[in-house]
Amino acid sequence: MTTETDEESGHYVSREPFDPRSIEQIAAGQESYFLASRRRLIWWKLKRHRLAVWCGFILLLMYGSVLISEWIAPYYYQTRNSGAIYSPPQRIHLFHQGEFIGPFVYGHDFQLNMENLQREYVPNPDKVEKLRFFCSGDPYRFWNAIPMDFHFICPAEGKTMYLLGTDRLGRDLFSRIVYGARISLLIGLGGIAVSLFLGLLLGGIAGYFGGWADSLIQRMTEIIRSFPELPLWMSLSAILPVTWSPLLVFFGITVILGMLDWTGLARAVRSKLLALREEDYTVAARLMGASSGRIIRRHLLPGFSSHIIASATLSIPGMILGETALSFLGLGLRPPITSWGVLLNEAQNINVVALYPWLILPVVPVIVIILAFNFFGDGLRDAADPYK
Amino acid sequence: MIQYVFGRLVMMIPTLLVISFIVFVIIQLPPGDYLETHIAELESQGESVDPAKIAFLRKEYGLDQPMTVQYFRWITGFVQGNYGYSFEFDLPVSEVIGDRIWLTVLVSFVTILFTWLIAFPIGIYSATHQYSWGDYGLSLIGFIGLATPNFLLALIMLYLANVWFGTSIGGLMDPRYLDQPWSWAKLMSVLEHLWIPVVVIGTSGTAGMIRRLRANLLDELDKQYVLTAKAKGLPRGRALRKYPLRMSLNFFIADIGNILPSVISGAEVTAIVLSLPTTGPMLLRSLQSQDMYLAGTFLMFLAILTVVGMLISDLLLAWLDPRIRLSGEVVR
């Protein structure tokens, strides 16, 4: 123990090595908070946002279902049943005359009303048709490759189970909605990929280089933003040649949706870059001779990636709605490709709303997914904001 | 102020020129032209086509010329009020269009008024009662309006209006008034039909506007002068009305630029479903049949409508808020 008085100043100076913890004790929780990575901080903040977490869960479920649509759907999406055209939804019951049976549906009695030539289906309480689980039903090719016939749920042998009714060809609407989720959800992701690419590229150029490139790109975004989106989408998808296969049309629509959406992202990227470009660490990197590409990738991108991801999440619903509107108008996807928009195309007529109201049910998943994306994106944006 | 207005007007010209070029490229892009499709169609029906007429049309509209020449001819004609020729209807475009453009303007204008009327009180309520049940409930309703596709909402409301009020289906007025001169009954019929598209289109824009207004007003309410006002003992309502509300009003006018493109988009698709005599249904048809001048004219008018609408909102804003015309930039 050597404590001495400093010769020159006459002050007391301790020769002991300094341990900061002797002054301030950091609790274990605090320490992990201070040392946590940015990603972890965002996750903690997001977790506090209940609604966003629930919506994220719904999104996860929906996107998860896309991987196993074939198992979830009780029918193959193109299976027709000429005996059940425009059949109304069948409800699942558990009890028959006070007795527990397990999940079953009442079979429908079909008759043609000769006065107005309407098909009438009446549930027959004598026909108890027990549902089967983990069963084999309609054959299909899993992911368009492996032939299988496994389903989570099937109707009783030789009977029907149309949980959400059938369309004009007697195809099960529920199965079609499950399959349609694939296209509708993918088109949002594909469109956002295109838009993200363009937005990062053009916004990055505008924000980092500035000058005439900046003003040119700025004017471009202004012009595109001042144009009503849907007519532009409509005219661009009218360009797609009729001879294209439905799959090519799908890609075409994806690109069109993305091509007009990048402006918002480009703006966000530009303004963030303009701010980050002046930060000391960027200047330091530049003075040390780092190339522009390296500065953008290593120093700038990590600074605003979370913000960009949040903005991207918020613009996916617009694309899903856009696809729905285009397909509804007959300018978008075409059968046999099935998306929610294509399904809603069948509900174009007011007679459908009056006579077969279940055909507008595909709008329910559309609403759910759009709300989920909105709330989740909001939560993500709040969580990614370091100043809140 | 005059300088600002002048500057904005001059800025509009290059914007519209670029838009017109984009529009022309778009309507030009599909392979072949209307005449080719038309000839093929007629010949498949066994009808003969007068080659002289086709050649005349082709020459008249410069379809044999390179694209830049065609564009130049189109845009100079457009400025002079000669919008070209609709091949499908065999009429000049200006006659086909008739007053469709004005009906679109009418529907959009009424929709924006409606959006304001709805969004303003709700936005204020949500901001002053932040995190209350009312705030959540109203936001949720707004969100559902945002998430429901316009066309489907239009279809359902059309059906309900027909069942509940006996409103005739489709169009902007009852069929029996179609060729009659304007009268009180005809006006009432138009109003009776107008509210459906207005509500349908309005719902999609309202949610966004409520949220932006709420965020803006909340920012303003957090400022110190509000605290001072309250500390002085100013009643709540007066402390809200006197400054924060007026500040957020500026933003409210600026927001028209944000919602106008979506209002016009919504107006198009809703008009198609409701078969309103506006630009929507005819634009769709002309796009499908490659009637390029008709489609181009519609697209161009929609763009002009948007750009002019944004200009008006910017000018209003500059008139309201001196900071904007002094710095020469729009603060959003």
Image (spheres, rainbow, N blue to C red):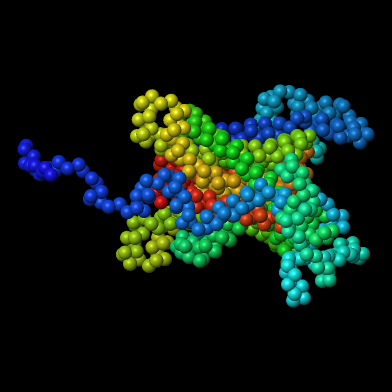
Image quarter of residue B200? bottom right
Where is residue B141? Give x, y as percent: 58, 61
Closer to us: B278 or B140: B140
Where is residue A225? Give x, y as percent: 57, 41
Toward the front, the furthest residue is A1
- Tell me: A42 left or right of B309: left
As drawn, A73 above or below B31: below
Is residue A63 something one can see in this rendering? yes
As drawn, B29 above or below A107: above
- Tell me: B45 left or right of B212: right
As drawn, B128 above or below B78: below
Closer to us: B27 or A256: A256
Where is residue A170? Give x, y as percent: 83, 55
Number of numbered discs visible in the structure rendering: 0
Quadrant (top left/top right/bottom left/bottom right) for the N terminus of chain A: top left
Residue drawn at the location 86% of the way across and 26% of the way down: B52
